[in-house]
Amino acid sequence: MHLVANAIAERDNTLALLPAGTGNDFARQFHYSKAQWRAAVFSDKISSIDLGKVDGRWFVNVAGIGFNAHVMNNLGQTKRLGKLSYTYAGLMSLFTAKLIRYHSNAWPEQGMMLLLANGKHFGAGLTPAPMACLDDGQLELLWFTPQTHWQRVILFVNMLLKRHMGTRNVHHGRITELYIAQEGYDIEADGEIVGRTPATITCCRRALNIKKAPL
């Protein structure tokens, strides 16, 4: 879907999605059954959704730096485990991913992961951005700042249980454009490494047409 979105964004084309990936994270937020997804392919109902953009590269779901990019770099050798690949790689990365820096006047400068979320889910079912909306013209900004391995484990468990929002190591905002000045961090988007910082990440309102299931 990431590649198709980059081919047809801001055009008149309409995308029909049949979830067949390992995690299907973008598809989860629609709460469609398999029958509804099949019906959507032939539906005449269309919705326009926002897309994120990392410099010149579009993304549909979630982009970020830090822990999530580290997981993607280490995922290849474990992907044979299917959906459990993300959980296993994530658990292993809790103890190996290095802290990153993100300058903010209000929040700690060192942290584990910075996410810019258009969709709610990533990592085969984790829900880091429960307030994300696909057509509000904004990206959810989440800055995760656990400093110790134990704090990382607690955060990971809280995220599995969907209890991480409002905890002291999770900071939340909304943006339409963000410049990340720190140099040398891999940028992960939709499960792909798409570039390195410094970079500008923006939200482009209603840049992609997708088919919806008929009522």
Image (tube, rainbow, N blue to C red):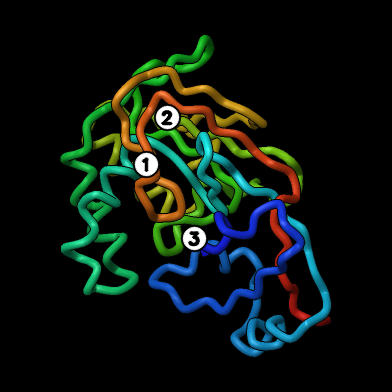
Q: Earlier in the sequence, mark 3 or mark 2?
A: 3
Classify residue 89 by image quadrant.
bottom left
Seen in the picture, residue 183 relative to 211 is either above or below; the reply is above
The Cα–Cα distance between marks 3 and 2, rounded to whole angstroms, is 33 Å
Contact? badges 2 and 1 (CB < 8 Å): yes
Could you say where residue 92 lies in the image, as x and y percent from the top left? 18, 51
Contact? badges 3 and 1 (CB < 8 Å): no
Quarter of the image where the C terminus is located: bottom right
Could you say where residue 49 lies in the image, as x and y percent from the top left? 72, 55
Q: Nearer the viewer, residue 140 or 48?
A: 48
Residue at horizontal 74%, vertical 44%? 205
Question: Residue 169's mark?
Answer: 2
**Circle 2 SS class:** loop
Classify residue 172 by image quadrant.
top right
Could you say where residue 99 lies in the image, as x and y percent from the top left? 27, 27
Between circles 3 and 1, the one closer to the viewer is 3
Q: Is residue 31 left or right of residue 183?
A: right
Residue at horizontal 31%, vertical 30%? 185
Instruction: State the residue position of label 1.
Output: 155
Could you say where residue 74 lies in the image, as x and y percent from the top left? 20, 52
Q: Is residue 174 left or right of residue 70?
A: right
Look at label 3 and name its amino acid: Leu
Look at label 1 and name its amino acid: Leu
Question: Residue 3's mark?
Answer: 3
